[in-house]
Image (cartoon, rainbow, N blue to C red):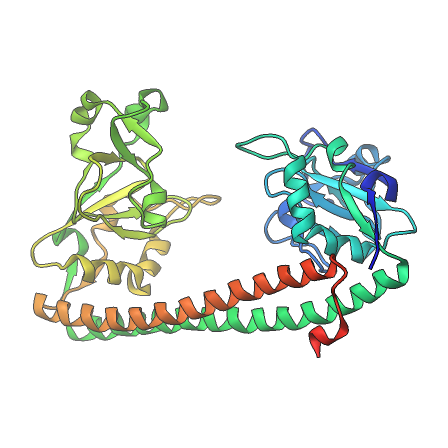
């Protein structure tokens, strides 16, 4: 099959980007969207991830020359390059500078162009056209040079028809895999919650503060960014609790500063918890970590001899603790963990050490089985995504046939 390759500027009526300055936002009005709102191949935008509005008056003033219209295609040109969505309905909305807006001429169908932009060919070429290393940017003048294969309109319609059918089946398979993945996680969480409900009914209850030493990270100006140095003693952050990793360190302090802040030193066998925003994530500090301290967004817990740290971690991840944490936390926009004094009063169900170890063994066995299921479903999701890329590759090599979905 012989197709013509044309530059984007030769198959489009306009290629513009969104607003270069931050507008004045209002509580309600015309949606103002960014890359995070795009939902490829969808009729709707993802308004859950990013919700901003501008007034109707501002919209009319700011977008009189680049108003998005039905049939246009939006493409991300900053950060994650090439995520695109065809505008399938008439609605008023503004776009930020991170999005490019393309109005195609009559020789190229929007659905076809949207599929092409998600193909391996387009992604590779767009990345090659980018500038910047830390944050990639696709300049409009460079984007206009993107080469697009342009078959006849009847061939475009046939490609769209086949891809629509295949992608619908793939999306259904992905939904099933995502549901199974979610269910496997919920099974473990439900079991964990049941375990601690039973423990609470049949064992002694103690104050959290009586069996654990608490140290909240330093507040105020005791750990300013101006104190950080390129190499030295580690400063552990929320990401280490959230991601349960201790090898990637962003910030360091001098030995003198470390000695001054020795109270906040993190040691193997401690447990850390995130305390702001993404709150209540738990990680046990492994052996051989880089010597360092916690920052203001972490709580360090050191259990006493009558409390097994793995039992403590499981309890803190269960609803028994998490619900109390949410109830006691403060902050309207960003939740912050309550004071150490209040946390110490939370009631902890505490069986004897031997019983704690038995409970840990049972929970860990289920955890291992759950993780194996999660691995299966994650592999399934990955293979479905690879299948999509493979089909898109065939489509734009002219190798797509109807039997692909039969």
Which residue extends farthest right?
106
Q: Is residue 19 above or below residue 341?
A: above
Residue at figure coordinates x 12%, y 54% from the top left: 211
Quarter of the image where the C terminus is located: bottom right
Q: Is residue 186 shown left or right of residue 393? A: left
Would you say residue 12 is visible in this rendering?
no
Q: Is residue 12 shown left or right of residue 75? A: right
Q: Is residue 222 above or below residue 118?
A: above
- Where in the figure is residue 217, as x and y percent of width and height? 26, 36
User: Which residue is more in the foreground, 203 or 32?
Assistant: 32
Which residue extends farthest bottom?
406
Residue at figure coordinates x 36%, y 24% from the top left: 225
Q: Is residue 202 shown left or right of residue 19? A: left
Q: Quadrant of residue 167?
A: bottom right
Would you say residue 398 is visible in this rendering?
yes
- Where in the figure is residue 170, as x and y percent of width and height? 63, 70
User: Which residue is more in the foreground, 118 or 176?
Assistant: 118
Q: Is residue 280 above or below residue 200?
A: above
């Amino acid at each position: 099959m012989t197709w013509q390759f044309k530059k984007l500027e030769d198959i489009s009526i306009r290629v513009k980007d969104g607003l270069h300055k931050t507008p004045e936002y209002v509580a309600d009005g015309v949606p103002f969207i960014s890359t995070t709102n795009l939902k490829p191949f969808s009729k709707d935008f993802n308004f859950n991830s990013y919700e901003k509005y501008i007034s109707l008056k501002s919209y009319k003033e700011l977008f009189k020359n680049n108003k998005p219209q039905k049939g246009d295609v939006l493409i991300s040109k900053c950060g994650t390059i090439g995520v695109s969505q065809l505008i399938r309905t008439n609605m008023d909305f503004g776009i930020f500078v991170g999005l490019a807006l393309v109005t195609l001429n009559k020789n190229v169908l929007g659905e076809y162009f949207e599929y092409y932009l998600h193909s391996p060919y387009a992604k590779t070429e767009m990345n090659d056209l980018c500038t910047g290393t830390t944050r990639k940017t696709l300049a409009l003048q460079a984007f206009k040079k993107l080469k697009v294969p342009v078959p006849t309109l009847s061939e475009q319609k046939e490609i769209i028809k086949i891809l629509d059918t295949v992608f619908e089946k793939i999306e259904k398979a992905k939904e099933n895999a995502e549901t199974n993945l979610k269910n496997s996680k919920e099974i473990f969480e439900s079991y964990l919650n049941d375990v601690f409900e039973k423990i609470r009914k049949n064992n002694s209850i103690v104050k959290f503060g009586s069996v654990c030493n608490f140290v909240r990270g330093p507040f105020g100006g005791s750990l300013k960014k101006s104190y950080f140095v390129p190499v030295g003693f580690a400063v552990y952050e929320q990401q280490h609790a959230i991601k349960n990793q201790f090898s990637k360190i962003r910030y360091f302090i001098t030995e003198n500063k470390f000695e001054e802040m020795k109270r906040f030193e993190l040691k193997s066998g401690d447990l850390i918890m995130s305390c702001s925003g993404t709150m209540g994530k738990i990680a046990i500090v492994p052996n051989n970590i880089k010597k360092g301290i916690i920052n203001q967004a972490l709580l360090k817990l050191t259990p006493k001899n009558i409390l097994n740290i793995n039992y403590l971690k499981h309890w803190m991840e269960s609803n028994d603790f998490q619900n109390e944490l949410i109830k006691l936390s403060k902050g309207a926009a960003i939740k912050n963990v309550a004071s150490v004094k209040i946390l110490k009063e939370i009631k902890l169900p505490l069986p004897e050490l031997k019983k704690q170890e038995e409970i840990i063994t049972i929970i860990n066995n289920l955890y291992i089985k759950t993780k194996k299921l999660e691995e299966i479903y994650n592999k399934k999701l990955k293979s479905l995504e690879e299948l999509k890329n493979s089909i898109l590759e065939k489509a734009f090599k002219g190798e797509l046939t109807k039997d692909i979905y039969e």
